[in-house]
Amino acid sequence: MTFCGIRTLGILLSCLTAISMSTQMIVEANETKPLSRTYKTIGSTHLNLFLYGVQDPVTGPPKPAIVFFFGGGWRSGSPRQFEHHSRYLASRGMIGITADYRVSTRHQSKALQSVQDAKSAIRWVRENASELGVDPDQIVASGGSAGGHLAACTAVIPGMGELNEDLTIGSQPNALVLFNPALLLAAAPGYPQWDASREESLRLRMGTAPKNLSPWYFVQSATPPTRAFHGQADTTIPFWTAQAFQQAQLNHGGRSRLVAFPNAKHGFFNFGRSNNAAFRKTLEETDRFLQSLGYLEGPQRVEDYLARVAPSK
């Protein structure tokens, strides 16, 4: 065999090896059960994080992590909402995490407690970074609807830490990925007015005045880099509220991009919905965003992942 032939064969074998390793990572991310860890205990309630991509024992350099908070109006929901997001990002070399937190139907709680739990979750991941193989300076907060609200609150609302936690450890993430998040929940100057009855309903559900938990009101300086996705036909959380939050971020020197989805309604991005069209696009955009931060590298593999977990009929 000539030198050129040997070289070509070597290149081919290298490519096949890379493809095999890529496929194996996707298989492992899809089939491996997440590692469960309790990050907070309140009385008899144990709140858990479900971690994808954690190695035992931890080897190699620390990895970026992303913590997902599920939606459900602070009343219900499940960490499994973002299981496929976490599995995919784990296959790309991150540590994907889905968080449970207090909701009213299971814990008779208010949104105020949900925000406290979200801050506890980010703080716990940062505090236990070395054990998990996480880079404490590369933690992303993410979530949808009420979960997107919680993620944004961890980034901009100060305080609200639990007294039994080490409050010297920060609970602010290094970046945000938000899916139709609730960001402006009270009347704000220059924007459409909230219906008084709706604001009162929110006050009862949140356990405080909605303004006190509206991330828009707390953008006072540069925020973590943000990528947000929102449907323009969303009647649950109006699109203009996402625009308002983005504009506040930009006004204070933050990096923020809002990706609009025409005719899309609330929850449009969820896995399994509309043949995964929006799931695919939002996950591809998330991958690109995380690459721009240096958290991921190499080609994205969303299509490969979907071909395995949701093959076309």
Image (tube, rainbow, N blue to C red):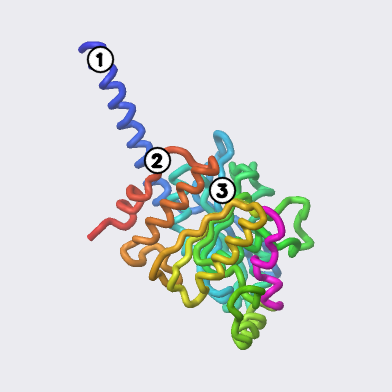
Q: Nearer the viewer, residue 197 or 160?
A: 197
The vertical placement of 102 against 39, above or below, is: below
The residue pinned by badge 1 equals 4
Label 1: which secondary element? helix
Residue 76: where, in percent of width, then height? 54, 74
Residue 223 visible (yes or no): yes
The residue pinned by badge 2 equals 299
Q: Nearer the viewer, residue 5 or 45?
A: 5
**Quadrant position of residue 120:** bottom right
Q: Residues within 10 Å of mark 2 (few under 14, many from 20)?
A: few
- Residue 77 placement, left or right of 121: left
Residue 230: where, in percent of width, then height? 47, 65
The vertical placement of 277 against 214, above or below, is: above
Label 2: which secondary element? loop
**Residue plotted at (25% across, 15% down):** 4
Of badges 1 and 3, the one in the foreground is: 1
Residue 101: where, in percent of width, then height? 60, 66
First to last magenta residue range:
208-222
The residue pinned by badge 3 equals 65
Residue type at tag 2 = Pro
Q: Is residue 145 magenta?
A: no
- Residue 95 placement, left or right of 7: right
Query: Nearer the N terminus, badge 2 or badge 1?
Result: 1
